[in-house]
Amino acid sequence: MNNSLDLIPPDDTGTDTLKRFRYQAQIALPFCLACARKERVQSIIMEHFEDIVVEYEDHWHFIQVKTRNADLAQWTLISALDGLKSLYRSFCKTSHLEAKYILFIEGTISKADDLKILTCPKSNISDSLVKKVSQKLNIQDSECKAFLSVVT
């Protein structure tokens, strides 16, 4: 019988896919270990509502993971908008839960961009950030402020 490992595959898309999901796996692993050790984490659910959903004893984390080629520019609010849109969709369905919505971004966030505000846990959400995000998500400012208050 021939060894398939000696054959050259027609393309290398599997490696590219694995590289893209590597960061997501790196984010999920500590939660999985905490769950296995029964350290407050009750369960981890992958690819349901968000890339990663973590159930704690008394709350939930809905986690969206974004990655891209390292040669692209720093992350900005505009480039992270797909992740925020996804988190907002989850927020709409799960806001009755005690939950936080987290956007993990692989790479550097531009220091001069409004996205940086969301990296500070106790920061005041500026009216300009609320206005920008509410326009992009096509929602009311009050709903956007409630959403952003639970996003990191």
Image (spheres, grey):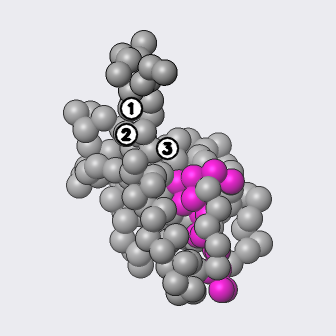
* Amino acid type shown at disc 1: Thr
Question: Residue 135: x, y in percent?
Answer: 57, 44
Question: Residue 68: x, y in percent?
Answer: 36, 38
**Which residue appears at 65% of the width and 62% of the height?**
45
In the drawing, what numbered circle is on residue 19? 2
Q: Is residue 105 above or below residue 121?
A: above
Query: Mark 1 and mark 3: span between their CA atoms?
Result: 26 Å
Kindly report the secondary structure that dominates the magenta region of the rendered protein.
strand
**Image-quadrant location for residue 4:** top left
Does label 1 or label 3 sit earlier along the sequence?
1
**Which residue appears at 43% of the width and 61% of the height?**
27
**Image-quadrant location for residue 41:** bottom right
* Amino acid type shown at disc 2: Lys
State left or right for residue 110 relative to residue 66: left
Crowd tier of the residue under label 1, counting other residues whose Cα lies within 10 Å: few below 14, some 14–19, many 20 or above: few
| Mark nearer the viewer, 1 or 3 | 1
Which residue position is annotated with label 1?
15
Closer-to-camera residue (113/82)? 82
Query: Mark 2 and mark 1: span between their CA atoms?
Result: 6 Å
